[in-house]
Amino acid sequence: MVEIISIRFKNGGKEYYFNPNGIQFQVGDGAIVETARGTEYAQCVRGNTMIDEIELTAPLRPVVRMATPEDLRTVERNREREKRAMSICQQKIEEHGLDMKLVSSEYSFDGSKILFFFTSEGRVDFRALVKDLASALHARIELRQIGVRDEAKLLGGLGICGKPFCCSQFLEEFQPVSIKMAKTQNLSLNPTKISGTCGRLMCCLKFEQEAYEDLVKRSPKQESFVETPDGAGTVSSVDLLRQTVQVRLESDPESPRTYHNSELCVIRNGKGRRPEGYVQPPLEELAKRRRPEEGHPAKVTEEASLAAAIEAAFPSSRSRREQPAPREDRQPGRRDRRRAPGEGGRPREERGAEPPQAKEEGGDHRPPNRRRRRRPRGGGGKPSQG
């Protein structure tokens, strides 16, 4: 076990483990740490914790010290300098006529280095721009090209749901999102409705996918044939979040009714033909599955209730399925046809073979169905007439 603290350099950024070096940190405390980019200021998001060394992917770096009020003033001063650097960089980009969009700038803690983030559709030759920025800002300059999703993460904003972007709040890294996730969640496939401000598919489709997959497993498919407290019918629509479905009853197909999943018994899941020989149970028995208005929903539609419904609907087929048919009733297989003498079937005499005593009398004892012996190679052809 090793003691660690978890820190974050930006809001919504990744969390990194550091060795507290004997210092007790609380959530929200500032820390000065040594990184590959030099000395940086970070914020503690999880205090001193003991974890297993197996969870560590790299050696721990120690924390230099806890941040002081002077360090906080330095951070605020660097943020003011970032605004001036942004305006100067934007002016230089216009002077050089470069096809690039400046997104943000970031000063190092000691102020010796400035990192500019930009987006562009292609590669940009910014060597002359770096020279002009270095002479104007008197610091080391680094330009880094990012994608549109990273741009939205850095700038932040409000999504179509009215809340801040997930990527700028709690998503540590981007994960691939596919259109199949939108189909699973019953969303409109209109690109304007399932795309975020960045123009890509919304990140929330990914981290909500597992919840929807679990709901899909517990809900009947559309066009399923189900039993409800009011009779049998076909599912016309499914509401995954509310766990309810609309059913067109056979007795009243023009007026769909809404039922909770716990009130249903699925007879056929998905599209298909109506089960042959299906007989609807009495309505009194089906009414027992009705969800109570107060309290927990009735625990129906589980495996036990489904098995009981199948047994009640198809008693004869279920009994035949559980009890194997006698041997003589089944179609004879290859093993059934190979019966030894005296175990039933036709006698050997009727099948064309000679009785056993014929072997002692001499003669050709080959069975009539035995394949004739092939002629040796080289001796084939018709016999000579001479």
Image (spheres, helix red, strand yellow):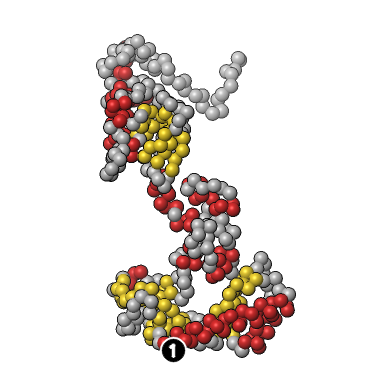
Q: Position of residue 203 (x, y in %)?
A: 50, 58
Query: Who's the residue at 37% across and 12% down the image?
Result: 352
Give the quarter of the figure containing the C terminus.
top right
Q: In the picture shown, does residue 72 fall above or below 342?
A: below
Q: Residue furthest top?
A: 350
Left or right position of 202 against 321:
right
- Residue linked to disc 1: 70
Query: Who's the residue at 38% across and 86% down the image?
Result: 65
Say which element carries label 1: helix
| Residue 85, image quadrant | bottom right
Query: Dot 1: few (<14), some (14–19), or many (≥20) neighbours within 10 Å?
Result: few
Q: In the picture shown, does residue 285 fall above or below 212?
A: above
Left or right position of 272 against 349:
right
Q: Position of residue 292 (x, y in %)?
A: 29, 39
- Can I make out residue 155 in this image? yes
Query: Who's the residue at 38% across and 82% down the image?
Result: 62
Nearest the eye: 177 or 334: 177
- Can I make out residue 311 in this image? no
Give the quarter of the figure containing the N terminus.
bottom left
Looking at the picture, which amino acid does disc 1 mark? Glu
Q: In the picture shown, does residue 248 fall above or below 204?
A: above
Left or right position of 340 against 119:
left
Q: Position of residue 295 (x, y in %)?
A: 27, 44
Q: Position of residue 11 (x, y in %)?
A: 46, 72
Q: How many marks?
A: 1
Query: Who's the residue at 56% across and 24% down the image?
Result: 380
| Residue 316, image quadrant | top left
